Amino acid sequence: MRSSVVDENPIGIPIGEVVRRSGVPASTLRYYEERGLITSVGRRGLARVFAPAVLSQLALIAICRNVGFSLDEITQMLSRDVANLDRSMLAAKADELDAMVRRMTVMRDQLRHAAVCPAPSHLECPTFQRMLREAGSDA
Protein backbone atom coordinates (compact mmCIF):
# COMPACT_ATOMS: atom_id res chain seq x y z
CA MET A 1 0.00 0.00 0.00
CA ARG A 2 1.35 3.41 -0.96
CA SER A 3 1.75 6.05 1.76
CA SER A 4 0.07 9.41 1.28
CA VAL A 5 2.70 11.20 3.36
CA VAL A 6 4.92 13.09 0.94
CA ASP A 7 7.84 13.55 3.36
CA GLU A 8 8.39 9.79 3.55
CA ASN A 9 9.51 9.74 -0.07
CA PRO A 10 13.19 8.74 -0.02
CA ILE A 11 13.88 10.97 -3.02
CA GLY A 12 12.61 14.20 -1.46
CA ILE A 13 9.69 16.61 -1.65
CA PRO A 14 7.97 17.05 -5.03
CA ILE A 15 7.76 20.59 -6.37
CA GLY A 16 3.98 20.71 -5.88
CA GLU A 17 4.38 19.96 -2.18
CA VAL A 18 7.14 22.58 -1.87
CA VAL A 19 4.75 25.08 -3.49
CA ARG A 20 1.97 24.13 -1.07
CA ARG A 21 4.15 24.29 2.04
CA SER A 22 6.20 27.37 1.16
CA GLY A 23 3.67 29.44 -0.77
CA VAL A 24 6.33 30.07 -3.42
CA PRO A 25 5.01 29.53 -6.97
CA ALA A 26 6.53 26.73 -9.04
CA SER A 27 7.73 29.25 -11.63
CA THR A 28 9.67 31.07 -8.89
CA LEU A 29 11.16 27.80 -7.65
CA ARG A 30 12.36 27.02 -11.17
CA TYR A 31 13.78 30.54 -11.49
CA TYR A 32 15.56 30.26 -8.13
CA GLU A 33 17.02 26.96 -9.29
CA GLU A 34 18.27 28.57 -12.53
CA ARG A 35 19.88 31.32 -10.43
CA GLY A 36 21.56 28.78 -8.15
CA LEU A 37 19.63 29.80 -5.04
CA ILE A 38 18.17 26.31 -4.55
CA THR A 39 18.91 22.90 -6.03
CA SER A 40 16.60 20.05 -6.89
CA VAL A 41 17.80 16.58 -5.93
CA GLY A 42 16.13 14.73 -8.77
CA ARG A 43 12.89 14.19 -10.62
CA ARG A 44 9.82 12.09 -10.24
CA GLY A 45 8.53 11.82 -13.78
CA LEU A 46 8.73 15.36 -15.11
CA ALA A 47 8.42 17.02 -11.69
CA ARG A 48 11.42 18.35 -9.81
CA VAL A 49 12.04 16.96 -6.33
CA PHE A 50 13.78 18.91 -3.56
CA ALA A 51 15.51 18.00 -0.31
CA PRO A 52 13.51 18.94 2.81
CA ALA A 53 16.10 21.67 3.57
CA VAL A 54 14.74 23.67 0.62
CA LEU A 55 11.88 24.88 2.84
CA SER A 56 14.36 26.56 5.21
CA GLN A 57 16.28 27.97 2.26
CA LEU A 58 13.09 29.47 0.83
CA ALA A 59 12.23 31.01 4.20
CA LEU A 60 15.70 32.56 4.35
CA ILE A 61 15.36 33.88 0.80
CA ALA A 62 11.98 35.41 1.74
CA ILE A 63 13.49 37.13 4.78
CA CYS A 64 16.36 38.48 2.69
CA ARG A 65 13.96 39.76 0.00
CA ASN A 66 11.75 41.40 2.65
CA VAL A 67 14.65 43.41 4.06
CA GLY A 68 15.76 44.55 0.63
CA PHE A 69 18.50 42.19 -0.51
CA SER A 70 18.62 41.73 -4.28
CA LEU A 71 18.64 38.22 -5.72
CA ASP A 72 22.29 38.76 -6.70
CA GLU A 73 23.15 39.61 -3.09
CA ILE A 74 21.21 36.60 -1.82
CA THR A 75 22.96 34.35 -4.34
CA GLN A 76 26.31 35.70 -3.17
CA MET A 77 25.43 35.04 0.48
CA LEU A 78 24.02 31.55 -0.09
CA SER A 79 26.78 30.40 -2.43
CA ARG A 80 29.21 30.25 0.45
CA ASP A 81 27.43 28.53 3.31
CA VAL A 82 23.80 28.88 4.34
CA ALA A 83 24.72 28.27 7.98
CA ASN A 84 27.31 31.07 7.96
CA LEU A 85 25.91 34.11 6.19
CA ASP A 86 28.22 37.00 5.37
CA ARG A 87 27.93 39.10 8.51
CA SER A 88 29.38 42.19 6.84
CA MET A 89 26.60 42.07 4.23
CA LEU A 90 24.03 41.70 7.00
CA ALA A 91 25.49 44.64 8.93
CA ALA A 92 25.62 46.81 5.80
CA LYS A 93 21.96 46.04 5.03
CA ALA A 94 21.02 46.86 8.64
CA ASP A 95 22.80 50.22 8.26
CA GLU A 96 20.88 50.84 5.02
CA LEU A 97 17.62 50.08 6.80
CA ASP A 98 18.54 52.44 9.66
CA ALA A 99 19.14 55.26 7.16
CA MET A 100 15.86 54.47 5.41
CA VAL A 101 13.97 54.51 8.71
CA ARG A 102 15.45 57.93 9.52
CA ARG A 103 14.40 59.32 6.10
CA MET A 104 10.94 57.81 6.35
CA THR A 105 10.48 59.20 9.87
CA VAL A 106 11.29 62.71 8.64
CA MET A 107 8.88 62.31 5.72
CA ARG A 108 6.14 61.00 8.02
CA ASP A 109 6.59 63.94 10.38
CA GLN A 110 6.47 66.39 7.47
CA LEU A 111 3.27 64.84 6.14
CA ARG A 112 1.67 64.93 9.57
CA HIS A 113 2.57 68.62 9.85
CA ALA A 114 1.19 69.37 6.39
CA ALA A 115 -2.05 67.61 7.31
CA VAL A 116 -2.68 69.84 10.34
CA CYS A 117 -0.77 73.00 9.37
CA PRO A 118 -2.71 76.13 10.45
CA ALA A 119 -1.34 78.26 7.59
CA PRO A 120 -4.00 79.41 5.12
CA SER A 121 -2.02 77.77 2.31
CA HIS A 122 0.71 75.15 2.43
CA LEU A 123 2.83 77.48 0.31
CA GLU A 124 2.71 80.02 3.16
CA CYS A 125 3.94 77.51 5.73
CA PRO A 126 7.68 77.75 6.51
CA THR A 127 7.86 74.04 7.37
CA PHE A 128 6.21 73.10 4.07
CA GLN A 129 8.55 75.48 2.20
CA ARG A 130 11.56 73.76 3.83
CA MET A 131 10.11 70.39 2.85
CA LEU A 132 9.82 71.55 -0.78
CA ARG A 133 13.42 72.82 -0.78
CA GLU A 134 14.70 69.54 0.66
CA ALA A 135 12.71 67.53 -1.89
CA GLY A 136 14.07 69.72 -4.68
CA SER A 137 17.66 69.17 -3.56
CA ASP A 138 17.12 65.39 -3.59
CA ALA A 139 15.75 65.40 -7.15
Image (cartoon, grey):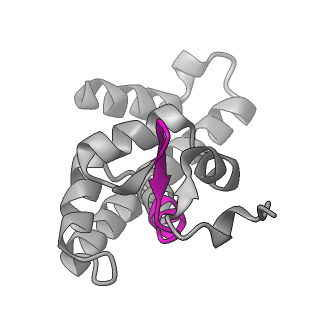
Measured as percent of width and height from the top left, residue 63 is found at 49, 61
In which quadrant is the N terminus drawn? bottom right
Measured as percent of width and height from the top left, residue 55 is found at 54, 64
User: 77 or 97, which lies in front?
Assistant: 77
Give the residue drawn at x 78%, y 65%: 3
Measured as percent of width and height from the top left, residue 52 is found at 53, 69
Q: Residue furthest bottom?
A: 84
106 magenta-colored: no
Give the residue drawn at x 45%, y 43%: 29
Q: Is residue 93 above or below residue 66?
A: below
Give the residue drawn at x 19%, y 76%: 88
User: 1 or 103, which lies in front?
Assistant: 1
**Residue 18 as seen in the image, left or right of residue 78:** right
Q: Which residues are magenta?
A: 44-59
User: 76 or 4, which lies in front?
Assistant: 4
Label count reads: 0
52 magenta-colored: yes
**Residue 126 as seen in the image, left or right of residue 16:** left
**Residue 83 as seen in the image, left or right of residue 77:** right
Quarter residue 75 falls in: bottom left
Q: Is residue 119 above or below residue 94?
A: above
Q: Is residue 57 above or below residue 73?
A: below
User: 32 or 129, which lies in front?
Assistant: 32
Measured as percent of width and height from the top left, residue 23 is found at 65, 47
In which quadrant is the C terminus drawn? top left
